[in-house]
Amino acid sequence: MPESLDPGAGAMLQPTPFHERTAALNLVNAWERWQGHTTVSTFLSPDDEYFATRTAASLYDVSPMLKYRIAGPGAEAMLDRMFTRDVTKLKPGRVLYGPWCDGRGRVIEEGTLFRESADSFRLNAAEPQLHWLEDCAYGFEVAVEEVTGAIAGLALQGPLSKRVLEDVGLAAAARLPFFGLGRFAFEGGEIEVSRTGYTGDLGFELWIEAERALTLWDRLMAVAERHYLRPMGSAALDVLRLEAGHVLVNVEYVGAGHALRASQTRTPEALGLGWAVNFAKPGYFNGRSALLAEREAGGPKRRLVGLDVEGRKPAHGAWLYAGRREVGQVTSACWSPVLKRNIALATVEARYATPGRKLNAEIYYVKEVTQGRVDAVATVVEPRFYAPAHRRE
Amino acid sequence: MKRYDAIVVGAGHNGLTAAAYLARAGLEVVVLERREQIGGAAISEERHAGFLYSSCSYVCSLLRPEIMRDLELSKHGLRIIPYENSTVIARDGDSLGFFHDPAKTRRSIARHSQRDADAYAEFNRDIYRQCRMIRPLLLETPPDPTSFSLKDLRGLRKLQKAFAQLGEDGLAQAMQFWTMSCGDFLDRYFESDLLKGSLAGNSIIGTALGPYSPGSAYVLLHHVMGDLDGHVGAWGFAVGGMGAVSEALAGAAREHGAEIRTGAEVEQLIVRNGRVEGVALAGGEEIRATRVVSNLDVKRTYLKLAAPSDLPDDFLESVRNFKIRGSSGKLNIALERLPEFPALAGEPLLRRGGILISESMEYLERGYDDWKNGQWSREPFLDITMPTHYDPTMAPPGQHYMSVFVQYVPPTLADGPWTPEKRDAFGKTVLDTIELYSPGFRDLVLDCWVRTPWDLENEVGLTEGNIFHGELTLDQLLFNRPIPGYAQYRGPLGGLYMCGSSTHPGGGVMGAPGANAAREILSDARHKFGRGAAA
Amino acid sequence: MSGGTYEVAVIGGGHNGLVAAALAARAGRSVVVLEAAERLGGMATLGPAGEGFDSAGAAHLLDGLSPALVRTLELERHGLAFAVATMDDVALLPGGELLVVSGSDPEATRRSLGRFSPRDAERLPLFEARLGRLSAALAPFLDRTPPSLRFQAWSERLEYLRLGWAMRRLGRRDMRDLLRIIGMNSFDLVEEVFETDALKGLIGFDSVLGNRFGPRSPNTVYTLLQRKAGTLAGRRGASLLPRGGPRALIEALASSARAAGAEIRTGARVAEILVDNGRVNGLVLADGSELDCRTVLSSAHPRTTLLELVGAGRLDADLVRGLRHARGEGGTAKVWLRLGAVPDFGLAASALGRSRLVFAPDLGFLERGHDCAKYGELAERPAMEIVLPGLADSHQLGSESQPILSATLANVPYRLRNRDEAALKRALIEHTTATLSELAPGLAETIEAAEALTPREVEAATGAPGGHWHHLETGLDQTYLLRPAPGLAQYATPIQGLWLCGAGSHPGGGVTGRPGANAARAALAAARARR
C-alpha cells in the first residue's frame, strides 16, 4: 500500500530492548504501554507469573524505567539537596530508596538512587525528571544525562533468584547485600546488578547495555526450566507491589510536577514515607521548611494506610466511612493470593489512620452486566502486607 | 406595523446563537443579515466548482458544549470531528509533531531536546491549570468591579474564588501568565526553536502582538481553552465546513420561530428618547422592535449604526479607542492532489491535522516587525489545514481543499491601501513560502482565493479584518471588554445590546458572547421596565 | 579572624543599602555597611574612567527619590541640595526644532506645544492630571510591603482591602480608566490622546527608558504610572539635578548613616552569608574574616544574594528556578562627552543647564530602536536623554568652556549579535556622536573625550548579573507582589534574618531609596516582634 494512503502510517511506539524475545513468549498477546514503550501485561497467566515470583523466580522487563546519570564533584551535594534522605551517607556500591519533594514539601516522585562511584549516581524514576533534575543541578558542579534508552533492565525476583544468578555465572552478584550494587563480568562484558525490586520479595535488578539485552535474556531463559523461572507481565506485578505495600505514582498520589490540583499531591509523611525524611541531616533539602512546618502543625491531614477488608470483593476505588462520615478512599486493592486476604491501600483522614481502626468500605463491583454493591468492614493495618524475612537474607 | 421583541443585526455565529436563545425563550425575533448568505465569518462557500471552502474561520474548538446541547445543534446537522495531530515543519526538513498520545509527542519533542520533552508535561500542566480557572468564566457576564450591586459583588466573588482555588503557586503563575509575553513564558520551559515557534504560533494567531509582546501569553490560553468531546484543547473540523456551524445555529433559531432575512442591510438605528425602537434598512424599510441586538463589533455598532448625537461623548471616545487591528489573511486553495511535505515523510499521518510554518520565535517576531512597518510578513507564519482528509465531500474525490491562515498581514500597507496587484503579490509570498516546504506544491494549485484584511473587512464586515472583533489584550478583556462599564452586553442606549465577539469572552467560534448576551436580555425582559443601560 | 560583631549588616553601599543602614542605625541598631568596591554609590555613581569626568555619575537626574526619606534622614542637613529643582523636558527633533515641556512654567509648554498642535496643548494638562490622579492612588503602595498570595495573615488581608479601597476611592470613572490602561502599551494610550509626534515620542521615551521595552510593549503604561507615582513633586518632568551629581546624594546618605552610628566599610566584599539551621549566622568576607551578625540586609541583586552568597543548595529548587527566570538583562547605556564648547541645540547655555533633552522624535522611531535591540543590534540613531549638568551646577565638573554632556541611551542590546563588547562600546560612542551632530551642528568637532558604559560593564562593576538598572525589569509580571519572584516579595527570604533591600525588590529601580527603606522597616519590625 502506498504510504500516503495508509491512514495509520507513522512511527510506532518504541519496543524495549527485550521486545524480540518477550513478543515471542507473549502467548495471549496482552500488551500495555509504559512511558511510550510496548510492554507485556500478561505472557500467559497472571496467576502463574505471580506464583513463580512468590515461590521461585520471575523476569520482568523494567527497561522503560527512566534512568538518569548524575555525575560530577557536586553530584553528592546536589542529590542530598534533592532527596529527603541523607545521600552523603550513601556509600558507593549501595542503593537508596526515597522520595524527592518540591519547595512545598509535596512528593514529586520516589525512586531508587544508585551510587555507582564517589562522583557518579544513577536515578531511576517512573516519570520524566530531567527538567527538575536540571533545576536542582543549578549551582552544583554536576552533569545530568538521561540514559534510559542506553540501558536495558530486567528484574529477577523471587526466593530462588539467587540460585538463578549462580546458575548463569553471577555467583558474586548473588552475594550482594540488601540494597547493594555492583558490576560483574558477564558474557564477555559487564553487567550491573542491584539487590532491589518492587515485589517485596528476595530479588535483583540486572542492568546491561541495550545492545546486549538479548544475550542476558537468553542466558537467563536457558536455565528457566530448572528454577521455575517465568517471564512476568505487569498484571502480576501490580498484585506483588500491593502486597509489599509499595506506593505507585499516579495511583496513590500524583507527582507534584504533574498535578493539576494541589489536593492530589502528598507529602512524604502522608504517603507513609515519613521515615525517609531526615530533618537531622546537615544539608538543606527541597521542601525542608515546608515539611518542618507540616510536622509542627501536627502532621498531614490525610494519610496512606493499609486495609484488611473483609470478604472477597476487591475494594477498587471504594469510599470509606466512619459511621456516616466519609473519611477516605481506596487507591489500590486486590485479593492477595499468598495471604488469602482481601487487601487495599487507601488515603484516609489522619485521625482515622491508626492501626486497628475499623472503617466501613462501600465497594462497587460488576456482577455480569449490573453493578453490585457491598459494604465491608475494613481494618486499618500497616501497609506492608507481605514482607518475608528471606527478602533481606 | 409589526413590532418584534428583538432584532438581531448580523447573522454571524454569535448573532444566530443569541437569536436562537431568545426565540427559544418565546421572544419574537428577526435576524437581519446584509449578505445573501448567513454565517458571517463562519461560512462555507463554493468558489471553485466542486470545492467547498471554509472561507474565513476554518477549525473549531471553542464552541461551548453547553450551547451545542441547549440548541440541539447535532439535530440541526452539526458534526465536528476532532483531528488527531498538529505539527510544525522546518525548512531544513525537520518536523515536530503533537499527537493525541502524550508518549508519542514526548518522543517527537525528544528528537529536538530531551529536556524540552520533559518540560512539555509541566508546561501542559501549567497551561491547563489556567484553563481550568478561565473556562467556567466564559459563560458568565463579567462583573463590574466599580459596582456595589449584589449581582456584581457576587460576580466578583466568583472571579476571586476562581483565582483563589489556584493556590499560592498557581496564583503567582496566573498573575505572571496574564501579564507576560508568550516568548518569555516559553523561554522558561524550552530551548528548542521549533517547539517554541509552534507553541508561540498559538499566541499570535489573530492578534497584533509579537511573541515577545507582554500579554501575549494569555492569547496562547485563548487557543487552548476550548474542548471537543471532553478533550480540553482539542480542535476539530466541522463536516461541511464552518458554514455548517452557522447553518445548525440558524436551524435552531428557525425551529424556535426566529425569522432570518438575508440581503437586509441595517443602515441605522431608530432611537427615541434614548431608547432604541428599531432599525432602518438600506432600502428605507423600517423595522420596529422592543430591543436590538447587535452582532457587529462595538465600533460598527456605535459609530456606524448609531447617531453620535444619541451617545455621550466620553463613551464615543472610548469606542473610538477600542483596538481592533487587522493582522491576518487567509488563502483558500483547491489542490489537484495531496501535496508532499518531505519533512513529514516519516510521519505522513501528521498531514491530516494542522501544519504550522513557524520556525522560531524570532521568525514570528520578525514577521511582526514587518506588520508594524506596514508590510505583510515577508516570511509569514502559516497554519495549514486540509479538512478534506476528514470530510472528503468538500472536494472532488482525490482532490483536496487546503486552508492557509496567514499571520501577519496589515489592514493597510505602508505605501497605501490594498489593491488587486498587492493582493496577488501577498498571495504569491504565501504560495512561495509553502513551496519551500513542499516542492512542487504550486503545480497542484487549481484555484487560489486570497483574502487580505481589506477583503475580510469589506466582504465579511470584520473591522480592519480582525478575526476577534478586537484585540485580546488585558485592557480589553473581562470587565474591560469592550468598554469599561459597558461589559455586560449593554451600552448607554436603552434596548440596545451587543452580542458579538467585541464582548466577553471575545473571539473565536465560541458562541459564548451570543449566549451571554441572550441571558442578559432575558433577565432584563423579566424585569418589566428593563434596566436600560448598565452603566 | 574576626570582623566584629553587629546587630545588622548591610551588603552593598549603593543608595538603597545606605538608606537601609541609616534607618537601622537610627532605630538604635549597631550597623555595618559592607561595600565591595573602593567607592560607595553602586550603580548611581558609576562614571567614566577617563580624566576630566570626575563627578559624572550614571544617575544624572533624580526623579523618584522619596521626599519622606529626605526628611527622615535629614539629607539636606547632610549636604543634599538640588542645583535645579525642576528641569524642563526638551524634545529634540531632526531639523533643529524643539518642543519644550516645562516643569515649572505651564504657559511656556502651552506656547511651545501650541506651535505643533493647539489641540494637544489643550490636552496635555488634562492628560497630566489624569495620570497624576491614577498614579496618586498607587503612590502610597510604593512605601509599603506588598502582601503575599497566601491570604492568611490578617495584616495581609488588610493590605488587599487597602488596595481595593484605594482603587474605589478613585471614583468609578477613574477606577475604570486605571483598570483599563494599566496593562496597556504607551503607544496606544498616547495615540488615543495626542497627535504631535514629538510629544508622543517624549512620553513614549519615559515609558521605555530603563527596560527592554518598545512603546508597543504592553506594560509600558504601567512603567509610566510607576515613574510618575515615584516623582518627588508629583509633577511631570520633576527631574531633579542634584548639586554635585549623584555622588553628592551618596555622600549625604553616608553622612546621615554615619551620624546615626553606622559603620561604613569599602573594599569589603562579602563572600558568603553563613546560615545555620535556616537562620543567618554571620558573614564571611573575601579576606577571610568573619562577621558576627544575625540580621543581614542585602542590596545586592537578588540572584547574587540568594544564589551566590547564600548558595542555591540552601534553598528550595523551585525558588531558585523563580529567581533564575526573573528577567534582568540590561538595556540601557551611558555615553559621556567632554566638549570644547557649549553645543548648539538651539538653546541658550543657561536654559540648556536646566533642560533634560530627549531625542525620540516619534513612537515609530522608538519602536524600531527596540526592534534593533531585540536582535542584538544598536539602532543607527539611538533614543537618548541628555543632560549637561555642569552648566547649571558649579559643583560639577564641566563648565561653559568645557561642558560634559551626559547621555542615557535607551534600547541598547545587552550584547551585540556576533560581535564583542568593544564593538558595542565603539558603536555607542559613534552612534551617539553621529546623532548629536545632526541635532547640534558642529558638536562632533568639539569633542575632546568620549566614554561609554555598557550593561555588561555595569554588571562587572557592581556584580549585578545582567547589569540592568533596575536589577530586574519592571514589567507587570515582575512588579509588586511578584518582585523579584513569587514568594520573595515581602523583602524576607527563606533564610531567617536575611532581607532583600535592593532595586530587585518592590518598588524597583531608579534612585528612590524606597526598597531600602521598606526592607529596613520590615526587618526592624520582625526583630521587634521576636523580642
Image: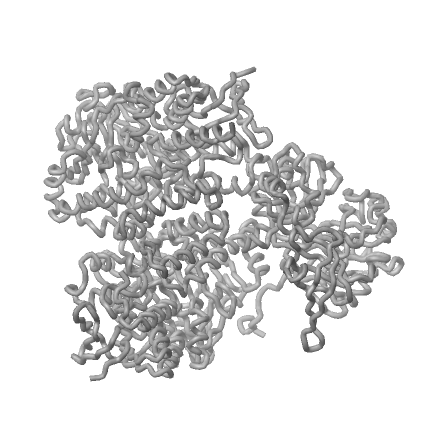
- Give the colouring mode of the picture: one colour
Q: Residue B474 appears in which quarter of the rendering?
A: bottom left
Q: Is residue A390 above or below residue C94?
A: below
Identified at 31% across, 29% down, the residue is C68
In the displayed image of the protein, which residue is found farthest to the right? A226
- B15 above or below C527? below
Q: Quadrant of the N terminus of chain C?
A: top right
Give the side of residue B294 with respect to residue C283, left or right: left
Residue C200 lies left or right of residue B526; in this view the side is left
Can residue C13 be seen from the camera position used here? yes
So how many labels did they put on this image?
A: 0
B224 is higher (above) or lower (below) than C214: below
Which residue is pictured at 86% across the width and 58% down the height?
A55
Residue A250, x across and y down, in percent: 63, 57
Residue B448: in sight, yes or no?
no
Q: Residue at x 27, y 35 (%)?
A: C231
| Between B265 and A116, the one nearer to me in the picture | B265
Quadrant of the rendered structure where residue A185 is? top right
Quick one: which residue is furthest to the front in this view?
A323
**Residue B48 x/y as whole percent:** 35, 78
Residue A257, x across and y down, in percent: 57, 50
Residue at left 20%, top 46%?
C127
Q: Position of residue C348 (x, y in %)?
A: 12, 28
